[in-house]
Amino acid sequence: MGAIEKIRATSERFSYSVRKRVGVAAHFLNKTVLLSFTNITMLPIEILQEFNSCYLKIQAIAQNENWLLLIAEKKIDPEAATHLGDVLHYFSEAMGCVEEIVEVKFNQEAEV
């Protein structure tokens, strides 16, 4: 299985898991992931950088005072915090899969 196939398989597993757990938030995340993977000319390091950028944005929302107040004041379902935590967890799992490819590629280039 080539690198692109591994990335697509990871994306599909990741998208399914997140959609199953998070619903609407996953739809946004799924769109972000699929947009990253539709451009086949992206290098694994570029994909990893996109993942990192998205992860940091979602993490900022999870730590945002207004987000935390919405949950604390029960203006939204308290489960929303759990769902966002799940998104971050699965996003980091997907990032780990891409990191493996980047590390292998980096090591191969270092040997040359």
Image (tube, rainbow, N blue to C red):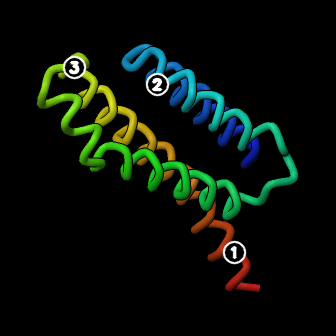
Q: CA distance from mark 3 to mark 2?
A: 17 Å
Specify the amino acid type for callout 1. Gln
2 vs 1, front mark: 2
Quadrant into which the N terminus falls: top right
Specify the amino acid type for callout 3. Lys
Q: Are marks 3 and 2 in contact (CB under 8 Å)?
A: no
Q: CA distance from mark 1 to mark 3?
A: 52 Å
Q: In terms of depth relative to the viewer, which is nearer, 73 or 25?
A: 73
Q: Earlier in the sequence, mark 2 or mark 1?
A: 2
> On residue 25, which mark appears?
2
Tell me which residue sits at (48%, 17%) in the image. Answer: 24
Q: Is residue 66 above or below residue 72?
A: below
SS assignment at label 2: helix
The residue tagged 1 is: 108
Task: Indicate the position of residue 6 as horizontal and vertical percent values.
Answer: 66, 40
The residue tagged 3 is: 75
